[in-house]
Image (tube, rainbow, N blue to C red):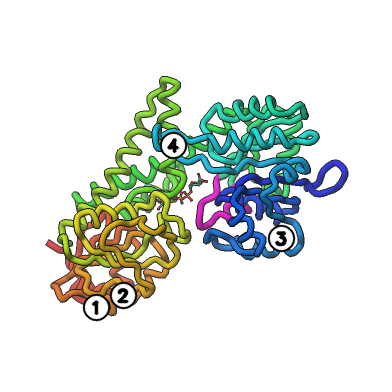
Amino acid sequence: MTRSDGHPLKIAMIGTGYVGLVSGVCFAEIGANVVCVDKNQGKIDTLLKGNIPIYEPGLSELLIKNKERQQIQFTTNLDEAVSQADVVFIAVGTPTSPESGEADLSYVFKAAEEIGNALDGYTVVVTKSTVPVGTNKKVKDIIAKATCQNFDVASNPEFLREGSAVYDFMNPERVIIGTDSPQARELLTRLYDPLCDEGVPRLRTTLETAELIKYGANAFLAAKIMFINEIANLCEATGANIREVAKGMGMDQRIGRSFLNTGPGYGGSCFPKDTLALNLTGKSYGVDLTIVEQVIRSNAERKSEMARRILTKIKPGETLGVLGLSFKANTDDTRESPAVEICQQLLDQGVKLKAYDPKAHLDKDQLQGDFTRVEDPTEVGKDASGLAILTEWAEFKALDFQAIHGKMKKTDFPSLFDFRNLLDPEVQNLQGFEYHSLGSQKMKITSSQPLTLAG
Ligand code: UGA
């Protein structure tokens, strides 16, 4: 991946959040010279020491390796990084604006202005942040106002998932290159050469199409999750089993098995924000996105429904043991985590919580009420009247549920709510529990070889 003079392409990555940091490190790994820029001096200091401020499997090793071979640098000096770059990526946050629910683009526009002021020679400015359709045109105007240098703008959305971000970057299913400029298209195509050798399609589109591909994909996946959650409800009412239903549905290639895992609703830093923003984009163009709107409503209702189910068994003043707080497994992220939201609803009702999560990062006061975090997962059972699994960490499958049961308040068949369908009563010894999974009927587990349907 070289320039016409044979030197490696130089990249400035603006923003060192999940997308920026993972992309920066991975571009370095595939041969580019990368400078990651962030305004937050503390973050840059952490990265300069070879530490990463987030938990992301595999990222730390790649960062250290590429730092050592001087393929990646970290700085707060945007001007210097941009002036030397062939390609500048904007990977700053686009959080939900609290007033309107729209994506807050102020960080993107500020970055565009600063990039415009710093450009020196032809540069391609690429947006990786998820931005509503039409944003890149505005980015182009902002840069044009700030510079008389030659530049092009492109949209190159990222599809990586937290928890498997490095793998996703290195093994893309497709690369979207949205730009009207043949020169920018050629340069970005070259940048992705090392990842696209074996038949990975590079879809070349306009700016607007690339922007909408990202939102369309995330909203569709969110809809798929909420759809299977509805079918799970119907399974509970009819005696069908969602695990088998999802398997059978997923065998149809037009449907596919992934994203058919029923759960407590979707969370994280992307789906909740992107579905809201897409819905509002639709409204601003006079286009009703009724399915997206319903998905947003169903997701909010799903979390309340999970809390209600627990409250039928656990009364105010009683203790619930909670396994999992992050929004999904293999990440420390608790942004918009269904687990956290369900916990808060229970705390609001006076339930006491004793929670364990191997990695989740919780801010002080993120949860208000009688909440204790324990370091040993079996401790969640202490004096608890019930248990709830809210995040699907694989390590929970190996827990000794009999040891946890032994620490619980002595009641007949305390409830175990498995809202991730993580356990299998045929595999884990859940004897003595009333087991409530999603999308199948609850069972009283009376022996280590069960199974009795609970009345
Ligand atoms: C999501 C997309 O999957 C990525 O492709 C995209 O790049 C990213 O957003 C983004 O826009 O940056 P991520 O938010 O990391 O990635 O997490 P997902 O793995 O998609 O999970 C999102 C939520 O859906 C989680 O709460 C998860 O538990 C839930 N989920 C997922 C289910 O409830 N069921 C499923 O079958 C799958």
Q: Which residue is mark 2?
A: 379
229 vs 319, nearest the viewer: 319
Residue 285 in sight = yes
Q: Which residue is mark 1?
A: 407
Stretch of the chain drawn in magenta: 159-172
Q: Is residue 435 magenta?
A: no
- Tell me if mark 4 has few (under 14), some (14-19) or many (20+) residues whose alpha carbon lies within 10 angstroms of its own: some
Disc 4 secondary structure class: loop
Cα distance, mark 1 to mark 2?
8 Å
**In this rendering, would 77 be left or right of 232?**
right
Q: Residue furthest front?
A: 41
Q: Which residue is mark 3?
A: 66
x and y, in percent, of residue 342 in the image: 29, 54
Cα distance, mark 2 to mark 3?
40 Å
Q: Quadrant of residue 176?
A: top right
Q: Residue at x 70, y 47 (%)?
A: 77
Cα distance, mark 4 to mark 2?
39 Å
Q: Quadrant of residue 205?
A: top right
Amino acid identity at mark 1: Lys
Residue 189 in sight = no
Q: Which residue is mark 4?
A: 97
Cβ–Cβ under 8 Å for marks 4 and 1:
no
Amino acid identity at mark 2: Glu
Labels 3 and 1: the sequence-earlier one: 3
**In this rendering, would 388 be left or right of 101?**
left
Cα distance, mark 4 to mark 3?
36 Å
Above or below for 20 versus 412: above
Q: Residue at x 14, y 73 (%)?
A: 411
Cβ–Cβ under 8 Å for marks 1 and 2:
yes
